[in-house]
Image (spheres, rainbow, N blue to C red):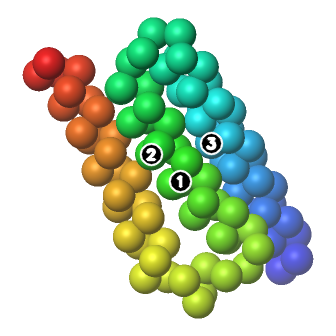
Amino acid sequence: MRHRGLVLDTITTMNLVLCVVIVALAIVAYNSKKSMIALYIGAAFGLFGISHLVNLIGLEAELTDLLLIIRTLGYLIVIFALYKVWKP
């Protein structure tokens, strides 16, 4: 049982690290290109990163409703960004 928890923690940690990298790249892309799309994507992955962090610190059971809102908002931001690319 512990092994499965360790695997899930490793996956969640990797997801958090990748979210941080994407947020950092989004900030660099915005500063370089002034692309609002980059900021939207960065904001969405920032929200996903928050949800991964909450899972890692063990508060997901207490914050289930908040996590649902955070993740939904993240997905809606990505949808909005893609819509802006599609329909400028």
Are there few (<14), some (14-19), or many (20+) residues within 10 Å of tag 1? many
Q: Amino acid at mark 1?
A: Phe
Q: Earlier in the sequence, mark 3 or mark 1?
A: 3
Please provide percent x and percent y for residue 24.
65, 30
| Rendering coords of residue 32 (x, y %) | 53, 10
Q: Amino acid at mark 2?
A: Ala
Left/right placement of residue 82 relative to residue 6 reads left
> What's the amino acid at mark 3?
Cys
Mark 3 Cα within 10 Å, few/some/many (few <14, many 20+)? many
Alpha carbons under labels 3 and 2: distance apart: 9 Å
Where disc 1 sits, the SS reads helix
Q: Is residue 33 above or below residue 18?
A: above
The residues tagged by marks 3 and 1 sit, at their Cα atoms, a distance apart of: 7 Å
Q: Is residue 88 above or below residue 59?
A: above
Asked if the residue at tag 1 contacts the one at tag 2, i.e. Cβ–Cβ closer than 8 Å, the answer is yes
The part of the image, by quadrant, that contains residue 69 is bottom left
Q: Residue at x 73, y 79 (%)?
A: 58
- Which residue in the structure is indicated by mark 2? 44
Residue 4 seen anywhere in this rendered image of the structure: no
The residue at the point 47 percent across, 43 percent down is 43
Say which residue appears at 29% left-offset and 33% top-offset: 81
Circle 1 residue: 48
- Image quadrant assignment for residue 77: top left
- Residue 62 in the image, given as x and y percentages of width and height: 59, 89
Residue under label 3: 19
* Quadrant of image for the N terminus: bottom right
Marks counted in the figure total 3
Cβ atoms at labels 3 and 1 below 8 Å apart? yes
Residue 68 as seen in the image, left or right of residue 51: left
Q: Is residue 27 visible?
A: yes
